Image (cartoon, grey):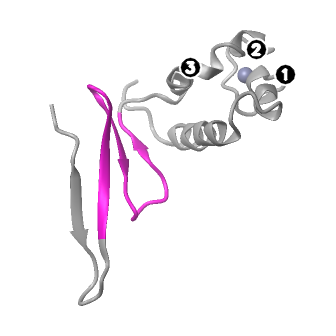
Amino acid sequence: MPETGELSARIGRGRNTTRATQIYAVSPDTFLMDTPGFTSIYLQGVAADDLKGYYPEFDRYAPECRFDTCMHYREPGCAVKMAVRDKVIPAERYQNYIDLYAELKERKPVYD
Ligand SMILES: [Zn+2]
């Protein structure tokens, strides 16, 4: 298994532009890469529809969503979104979910 570590890359010439890429191990087969070269985080091995499983604070509200298949994204009657509006789920946390969800949705599935 690869180790969590830090990669450094020097970009540019003669300027102080050293950047670091952080890789975080989320689970044994899932890594988060955070790099200044990209505004987004790349989640390997996570399907968009499974992402909500990484947000346990949603679990309490999800059963109240109008649709069983609710992704807490653009669906009407979403109890998670209501919990965010009521500030019981931090907006930052929800925004993080939405950003990742939208990104994962755009990506081609790893498996069919
Ligand atoms: Zn929902």
Distance from Cα at disc 3 to Cα at disc 1: 20 Å
Q: Who's the residue at 22% across and 63% down the image?
A: 8
Residue 3 position within the rendered picture, expressed as x and y whole percent measured from the top left: 17, 38
Q: Earlier in the sequence, mark 3 or mark 2?
A: 3
Q: Mark 2 points at which residue?
A: 67
Q: How crowded is mark 1: few (under 14 residues within 10 Å), some or many (20 or more)?
A: some
Q: Which of marks 2 and 1 is nearer the N terminus?
A: 2
Q: Name the residue under label 1.
A: 77
Asked which secondary structure carries label 1, the reply is loop
Distance from Cα at disc 2 to Cα at disc 1: 8 Å
Q: Do the residues labelled 2 and 1 touch (CB within 8 Å)?
A: yes
Q: Who's the residue at 22% across and 41% down the image?
A: 4
Residue 56, disc = 3
The stretch of residues the image draws in magenta is 19-44
The secondary structure making up most of the magenta span is: strand
Q: Quadrant of ligand 1?
A: top right
